[in-house]
Amino acid sequence: MSQENGDKVRLAVLAASVLPGFIVGGIINGGFLVEALLGQDGMDLNHPLDMISSGFCIWVFFTLAGAVVATPVAFFVGLPVHMFLEHRGKVGWLPYGALGLTTGVIVAITFVGIQDHDGWGWGDPKEFFDSLLVFALLGVVNTTAFWLMIRPDRTARRKIDKAS
């Protein structure tokens, strides 16, 4: 991997790591806004500045929390997997998406298992499967963002063209 390509990959890993938390924060923030517009759960549109500041804090929290979880996983799991896939010539979106899904499931099992030690190890089965789904989707979002920034399929084509 060249120095320029290595820098591009590391930057893509960092950017893609922030994206899932940013998306989750936006979804939660949007949900709060809808609840406020519908007048549910004690939300009050009489204090829009409070809502904006609370929403911004929620967004920042989820973006940072997502980055704290996703960045180490991306560097210690994602980069070696990226290099392996590139070496094997599996540079399409599907292998990246499938491994992102798998990584998301593994992270969900790890974090939910660590977090909740009552009952059968993971608490309520419905909550566990909800977490599993969310982490799996975020894994796919993360790897898709990384793949779109790096586009290993195009890099592989350029290498073939140079060799010809």
Image (cartoon, helix red, strand yellow):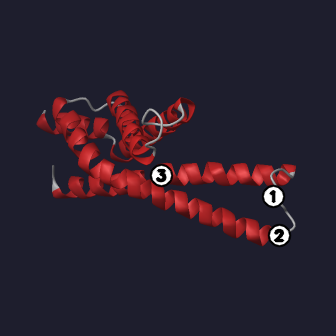
In the image, residue 105 sits, relative to residue 62, either above or below, namely above
What residue is disc 3 on? 19
Sequence order check, earlier mark of 3 and 2: 3
SS of the residue under disc 2: loop
Q: Is residue 15 visible?
A: no
Tell me where residue 94 sits by quadrant: top left
Mark 3 or 1: the one toward you? 1
What residue is disc 1 on? 43
- State the residue in front, 109 or 59: 109
How far is disc 2 from disc 1 in space, using C-alphas? 9 Å
- Kind of residue at disc 3: Leu
Mark 2 or 1: the one toward you? 1
Sequence order check, earlier mark of 3 and 1: 3
Tag 3–tag 2 contact (CB < 8 Å): no
In the image, residue 149 sits, relative to residue 144, either above or below, namely below
At a point 20% along the width and 30% down the height, the residue shown is 89
Tell me where residue 93 sits by quadrant: top left
Mark 3 or 2: the one toward you? 2
In the image, residue 55 sits, relative to residue 108, either above or below, namely below
How far is disc 3 from disc 1 in space, using C-alphas? 27 Å
